[in-house]
């Protein structure tokens, strides 16, 4: 509704009539060098802001709110595996609603494996193991849904389960030699939506909106408008 008011004001001024729009609001809300007016859609920007809370939750931030969420909501479970409760708060429901999109760009650089869920977190080059192999691999490994990577580490070596499991055998086969545990190093959250691996609301917004091809002559339009405004 708010964006509808913005769109009406853009085309009709204070009359706020919704008819007569020349260009879709989605097109207007693109960066200037992609053919838009540089306006950010509130829907996308708000979703990116909600993702900031998810990043804090998944990147092992130290805060009272994070500790409370882990104790009250997660209870040693993965954020990717829990269901949305019927009686949860508005913000918790929002967090769970955007997690699938957030997960597309969230990875874990595994160190000791103490904080990384082996089946649900994307710490392996092939991505989430539960997405790759399904729930069968949990049973074949005689494990549980909330197991951490550290449970399969002995010193600086992997300690994979033994047994005739095609899934475990394939996991061992596709695990590169370079992916080695490091008990002296903490697990590190990585945001693949930015070059430095750190989350920002701006980078999340760019991931959500989807970039369009650059328009090479866009700067000429904006330089001309600036020049005309000075006349």
Image (cartoon, grey):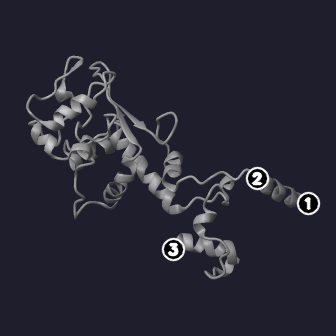
Secondary structure of residue under mark 3: loop
Q: Could you tell which of marks 2 and 3 lies nearer the N-terminus?
A: 3
Residue where numbered disc 1 is placed: 231
Compared across the picture, whether 99 is left or right of 72 comes to right
Question: Residue 167: image x %, image y %?
Answer: 17, 38
Compared across the picture, whether 86 is left or right of 214 comes to left
Question: Residue 67: image x %, image y %?
Answer: 28, 41
Q: In this figure, what is the number of numbered marks?
A: 3
Residue where numbered disc 3 is placed: 1
Q: Could you tell which of marks 1 and 3 lies nearer the N-terminus?
A: 3
Secondary structure of residue under mark 2: loop
Secondary structure of residue under mark 1: loop
Q: Alpha carbon of mark 1 to alpha carbon of mark 2: how far?
A: 22 Å
Q: Local crowd at mark 2 within 10 Å, few (<14), some, or many (≥20)?
A: few
Q: Could you tell which of marks 1 and 2 lies nearer the N-terminus?
A: 2
Location of residue 116 by image quarter? top left
Which of these two is toward me, 119 or 168?
168
Give residue 217's mark: 2
């Amino acid at each position: 509704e708010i964006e509808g008011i913005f769109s009406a004001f853009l085309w009709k001024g204070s009359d706020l009539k919704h008819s007569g729009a020349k260009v879709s609001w989605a097109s207007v809300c693109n960066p200037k060098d992609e053919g838009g007016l540089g306006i950010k859609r509130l829907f996308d920007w708000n979703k990116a802001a909600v993702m900031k809370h998810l990043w804090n939750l998944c990147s092992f931030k130290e805060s009272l709110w994070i500790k409370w969420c882990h104790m009250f909501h997660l209870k040693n479970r993965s954020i990717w595996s829990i269901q949305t409760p019927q009686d949860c708060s508005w913000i918790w429901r929002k967090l769970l609603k955007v997690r699938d999109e957030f997960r597309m760009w969230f990875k874990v650089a595994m160190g000791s494996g103490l904080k990384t869920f082996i089946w649900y977190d994307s710490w392996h080059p092939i991505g989430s193991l539960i997405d790759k192999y399904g729930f069968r691999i949990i049973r074949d490994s005689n494990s549980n849904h909330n197991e951490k990577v550290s449970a399969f580490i002995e010193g600086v070596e992997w300690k994979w389960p033994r047994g005739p499991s095609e899934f475990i055998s394939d996991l061992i086969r596709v695990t590169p030699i370079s992916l080695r545990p490091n008990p002296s190093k903490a697990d590190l959250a990585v945001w693949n939506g930015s070059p430095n691996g750190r989350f920002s609301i701006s980078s999340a917004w760019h991931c959500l909106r989807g970039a369009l091809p650059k328009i090479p002559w866009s700067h000429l339009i904006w330089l001309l408008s600036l020049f005309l405004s000075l006349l």
